[in-house]
Every structure is written in structure tokens, then in C-alpha cells.
Amino acid sequence: MRIFDPHIHMTSRTTDDYEAMYAAGVRAVVEPAFWLGQPRTSVGSFTDYFDALIGWEPFRAAQFGIQHFCTIALNPKEANDPRCLPVLDELPRYLAKDKVVAVGEIGYDSMTPQEDKAFAAQLHLAIEYDLPVLVHTPHRDKAAGTRRTLDVVRESGIAPERVLVDHLNEVTVGMVADAGCWMGFSIYPKTKMSEDRMVRILRDHGTGRMLVNSAADWGRSDPLKTRKTADAMLAAGFSAEAVDTVLWRNPVAFYGQSGRLELQELTPDDSALFEGNSVRRGGE
Amino acid sequence: MHTDAHPHDVPRDALRSALDCELTSSAQAWLKTALSEATADPASLRAAFPTVGRRCGRGALPGTGWSTEDAVRALLLTALPLSGPALAAEVTALYERGDAAERRAVLSALPLLETADPAFAALGLPLVRDALRSNDTRLIEAALGPYAARRLPDEEYRQAVLKCVFCEIPLDRVAGLAARADGELACMLADFAHERVAAGREIPDDIGPLIRRFPQAVQESGLFAEARSADPARREAALRVLNALTGAA
């Protein structure tokens, strides 16, 4: 089984996770830029983080046979801090990079006027840089937040098929389906969404434009939730074809719109480190 | 010991002709424009630089030991109409604003920049040092080309070689090693071999030839004491390594 995790924060995870993910079938991931638990206080803190997302983290992932891509943005939470706002001026140079396959995560946290501004500005950057967009929906007041999110997306003029609206649930999935955007679901151990609820949603809404992610980060989360959802789908009678659609083809189709999703077969023997033009020391 | 010329010591014109053969016509057209724009306005290179792989491809450039994207970026860097500190400032900005592939290309291009502009001289060393502090083996390897071989002070060069051994970069990729290896480096490697033996681990094959050139290094290491270890496994491992490093234990 091949798995593409379209939303996972590997910077916060260990090499054991990479090994377990590879063993479970994960071959590609997208790491969206987000906040770090501890608030940032300067632009430099963002650029160092972005540099890791296009430098060290893909290198680390390749050692374990996993291709790593990322999305770049000022996240909604930190859009409220005036010390962080100037990072918007640094985004263009990152949006030009090879492994940046979308603008994200953008959207709402507390639905403040500052978040409105950052959200709209970054939707325009996505249009300008011809990139799809990953949109986070708020954890609190989710239905209202998702409705407002879809209004802002519509007003921006970006094509709905270039927008993935994430962290959806039973209450919000319908409006996103109607808007024509892609639908993302974060499967968490306790909160957000479970494997069985996900299976019911897929039964009710079909597999089209549906993406499943672990959104694993520094909080209580599980990087194998993608595989566990795939297993739950099979147990519930979904075909291997349907599983491949949700766990591989859909994320490839969505992020492929960037024109930068160059997928290749890696092996976890570290030979990827030398990009085919040389061979690493044999054996351990 | 590897003594052939390092691929990064290639003349600019050779890279150019290899690219002329390899690039598609649309990539050639793009490169031509990017070169003339870089010549006219150095800052324009900042926009072109990240897109090189997508524009020109990433595969190996036949007959050169370079990748196509590295070669194109190197060519673009040598088109900058700048010299000395001004050239170094622009090259440094491209490195610092670059992703891993862009940084690798800048490091690989340092010998070409040095040749094209004698005033560039040692101004690229901060980039070499930055890469050597990283843990990304692609960057470490690219940093240890002919430029580092010519410019890096002895102590830093030795530490860099040792770092390669630790992060499993084969030593035949390190430029200038045959000429720059010295007794001090051999001692560091013999001490490393001792540590590995004491830990019950094997030593990489490619440190042997370098250590053998400086027999004193083995004498001064703890390997002979290790060969008298109370632990039979450590004793055997030490004898095996001593055999490999001296030809006779």
C-alpha cells in the first residue's frame, strides 16, 4: 500500500517515526508551515524554520525513503502578532522554491481582522505564484469559521479546485463539498476526527476530492493514522482502489497542480543522499 | 589514493559545451536569457536561481561529473559582472537565500568563481565553513572541492576530513586529500580507528591507505594497547585493524 500524508509536521517528529511511516507504506509527505507551540517573536525565527523545511527536513526524510515537500505561509495564529507580520514580505522568495507545493497553512484561528488581512494577502500570493492553497479551519467555532473561510476564498477569485480546506468534520464537510474545494480530514487519537468516523464520511460523501492526513505534530498525535484509516476503509469494505484514491491519488492530484511535485522512488538505504550520481559507503 | 582532477575544477567553457549538447532547445533559450539578464542586472539572478532545476532538468551532465542544475547555476554565477567583495556579497546572498540544491551549486561553483575573478580569492570561505557546520552530506561533500583544498587552513581541513569519515562520505570525493594529508590527520584517523575498535565496530576501508602513509600514527595510537586488551573480542578486532593498517601486527 502506498500512502501520501498531505499534512504532517515532521520537524516535530523523530527518526523512529520516519522508520515506522516507511514500514506502514508512507512514501511522500507534505509539511505545512505552522506555529511551533512556543510563539515566535521575530521574522528570523520564521526564515530559519522555512530554510529547514526546504533544506534539512527533506534530507532527513530521504534517508528513510520518504519524499518531503512543504507549504509555506504565515500561520493564522501568528498573523495576530505584529512582530511576525513582516514575514509576509519574505514569502515570495520561498514560494519560488522547488519543494514548495502550496501556500499554507493559512486561514482562521480566532477570526480577527489581522487574520482576515493575512489570509487575503496570502490567497493573492498563491494566485501570483500559481500555487494551490492549504487552508486551516479553526478548532473553535468551526462551522462559522469554515463558512467565513469559504466566503474569503470565493472573494479572492482563486479557483476552488486549487484550494484544500483542512481539519473538516461531519458538520463542515458538506459546505466544502458544495464549494468545489478539496476536503481534508486530520485523524487524531482523541480530537478532530477518528478512523471510523472518517470511514462513515467517505461512505456518505464518496472518495472524490477527499484527503486524509495525520496532521501529526508536537501534540498528542499519531503519524500512522493515515495507514490506520486505510485499514479501517478496507475493513469496512472499501476496495484497494478506493483506498489508493484517498491515500495517494488525491493528494498527488491536488499538490500536483503546483507543477513541482516531482515524485520518484526512494529507498531507505541513504543512497538518495547522493541523488543518483554517486553511491554511498556500502554497509553499516 | 584518488589523485585525478576533481570535477569541480572543470573550465567554464567545458561546462558550457556540455550544456549546449544536453539542454533542450527551450532550456537553452531560457539559459541564454538568464545569462544576459544576470550580466545586465546581477539582482535578477535571485529570481532565476531557484527555478533552474525546473527549467533545465536535474539529471547528470554527461562527461562532467556535474548535475545539469548545478552546472547551469555555476554558469550563471560566473556571468555576474562583479568582482571581489561585491561578487562575494551577491554569491553569499544566493547561498543564504537558497534551498539545499541552490547551496550545493554555489559551493560547487567556488573554484570557477576563483578562477574567473582573482579578487574573489578567499571570500567564499565563510560559505565553505557554513556548509561544513551542517549535517547535510550533500553540502559537506560539495564544500570539500578544490576551492576548500586550496584555501582551507590545515586544522579546518583535517576536521573536515574527519567529519566526512563520521558522516560516511567516501574520502575519494574530498579534493586534494592526497596532497594535503599529513601526519596529524593520520593520527586523528588512527585514534578514530582505536575508538571504533574499542566499541566493537568496524573501521571504514578508505581510511587505511591514508593512515599507512604515516606509520608513526599507528605507533602513537592506542591500537597496540588495544591488541593486549583483556577482552578477546576487542583484542581480535585490534589485531585485525593493525593488520590492515600496518600489513603486520
Image (tube, coloured by chain):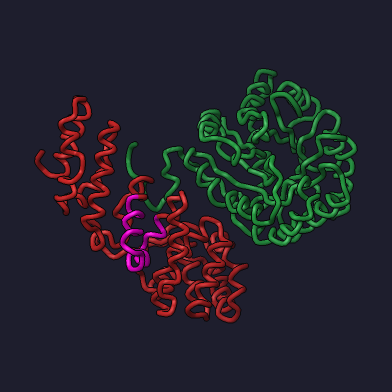
In the image, residue B140 sits, relative to residue A253, either above or below, namely: below
| Residue A102 falls within the magenta-colored stretch | no
Q: In which quarter of the image is residue B176?
A: bottom left
Query: What residue is shown at x 80% (from left), y 43% (from top)?
Result: A181
Res B140 seen here: yes
In the image, residue A271 sits, relative to residue A47, either above or below, namely: above
How far across and how far down the image is residue A47, in percent? 64, 55
Image quarter of the C terminus of chain A: top left
Chain B drawn colour:
red
| Residue B152 falls within the magenta-colored stretch | yes
User: Along the line of sight, which residue is nearer the eye, A57 or A131?
Assistant: A57
Number of residue marks = 0
Q: Is the magenta stretch mostly helix, strand or loop?
A: helix
- Give the chain coloured green: A
In the image, residue B146 sits, relative to residue A20, either above or below, namely: below
Image quarter of the N terminus of chain A: top right
User: Along the line of sight, which residue is nearer the eye, B135 or A22?
Assistant: B135
User: Along the line of sight, which residue is nearer the eye, B88 or A201?
Assistant: B88
Q: In which quarter of the image is residue B63?
A: bottom left
| Residue A22 placement, left or right of B137 | right
How far across and how far down the image is residue A57, in percent? 55, 45
How far across and how far down the image is residue A269, in percent? 42, 38
Q: In which quarter of the image is residue A93?
A: bottom right
Query: What residue is shown at x 39% (from left), y 53% (from top)?
Result: A277
Res A245 seen here: no
| Residue B156 placement, left or right of A190 | left
How far across and how far down the image is residue A245, in percent? 67, 34
In the image, residue B68 sits, relative to residue A5, either above or below, namely: below
Query: What residue is shown at x 85% (from left), y 42% (from top)?
Result: A110
Instruction: Magenta stretch: give its range.
Output: B141-162
